[in-house]
Image (cartoon, rainbow, N blue to C red):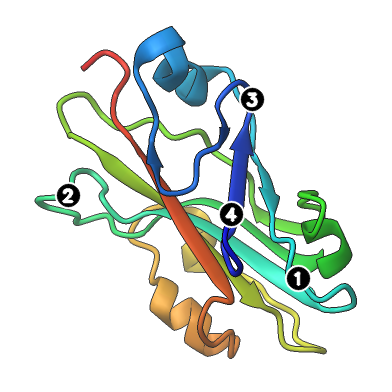
C-alpha cells in the first residue's frame, strides 16, 4: 500500500484494504466462518513505540439505521511497532477478534481498522459497561479518555451476508 496505509491480510484474498470482499470462491462465507483474525501490517510503525488497534463496524445493524454504532470487533493495545511492521498483532487483547457476520438483507457493512499511537505510560482499559457489550461502543469517548489523538493509519473493507 501507499505510505501511511494499513494492510489487512486474510488467507486467499490477501490485502483487503479499501476493497469489497467478492462473493466468488465462497470468500464472504470464509470470512464469516473460517478465517481467523487477519494479519495487520503497518510498515511505517516506529519500532520502539506502542500502538492500539481498533476494528469496528459502524453499520450495525445496517447503514440506514446504525443504532448499534460502533460494534467492536477487535481491540488490542500495547502492540510493539517492531511487530506491526511485520504484521504481527501481539499485545494486550481487550476484545477478542470476532468475525464479520453482517445480518441477512442488511446490505454492505464497513469494517474499519484504526491504528493509534499509544501514549507512553498509559494503561488502556475498557469500562465495565463497555466490557458487557460489543455494540453501541463510544469510540470517540474511548479515544479521548486515553489521549489517543488521530489514527496514524486507517483502512476499511466491505462485505455483506454471504447468503444475500
User: Comparing marks 3 and 2, which lies closer to the viewer?
Assistant: 3
**Residue furthest front in the image:** 2
Q: Quadrant of residue 112?
A: bottom left
Marks 1/4: CA distance?
A: 14 Å
Q: Secondary structure at mark 4?
A: loop
Marks 3/2: CA distance?
A: 27 Å
Label located before the other in sequence (2 or 4) = 4
Does the rendering let one see residue 127?
A: no
User: Comparing marks 1 and 4, which lies closer to the viewer?
Assistant: 4
Label located before the other in sequence (1 or 4) = 4
Marks 1/3: CA distance?
A: 23 Å
Q: Residue at x 26, y 13 (%)?
A: 163
The answer to whether 90 is drawn above or below residue 128 in the figure is above
Q: Residue at x 83, y 79 (%)?
A: 49
The front one of 109 and 130 is 109
Question: Relative to residue 73, is residue 21 drawn left or right?
Answer: left
The answer to whether 23 is drawn above or below residue 65 in the figure is above
Q: Residue at x 59, y 69 (%)?
A: 4
Q: Are marks 3 and 2 in contact (CB under 8 Å)?
A: no
Q: Secondary structure at mark 3?
A: loop
Marks 4/3: CA distance?
A: 17 Å
Amino acid at each position: 500500500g501507499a505510505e501511511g496505509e494499513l494492510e489487512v491480510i486474510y488467507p486467499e484474498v490477501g490485502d483487503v484494504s479499501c476493497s469489497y470482499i467478492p462473493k466468488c470462491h465462497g470468500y464472504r462465507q470464509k470470512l464469516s466462518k473460517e478465517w481467523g483474525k487477519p494479519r495487520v501490517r503497518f510498515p511505517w510503525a516506529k519500532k520502539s513505540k506502542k500502538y492500539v488497534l481498533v476494528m469496528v463496524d459502524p453499520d450495525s445493524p445496517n447503514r440506514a439505521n446504525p443504532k448499534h454504532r460502533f460494534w467492536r470487533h477487535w481491540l488490542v493495545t500495547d502492540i510493539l511497532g517492531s511487530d506491526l511492521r511485520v504484521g504481527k498483532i501481539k499485545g494486550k487483547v481487550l476484545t477478542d477478534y470476532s468475525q464479520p457476520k453482517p445480518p441477512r438483507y442488511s446490505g454492505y457493512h464497513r469494517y474499519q481498522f484504526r491504528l493509534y499511537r499509544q501514549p507512553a505510560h498509559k494503561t488502556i482499559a475498557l469500562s465495565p459497561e463497555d466490557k458487557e457489550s460489543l455494540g453501541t461502543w463510544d469510540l470517540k469517548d474511548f479515544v479521548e479518555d486515553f489521549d489517543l489523538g488521530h489514527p496514524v493509519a486507517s483502512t476499511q473493507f466491505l462485505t455483506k451476508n454471504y447468503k444475500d
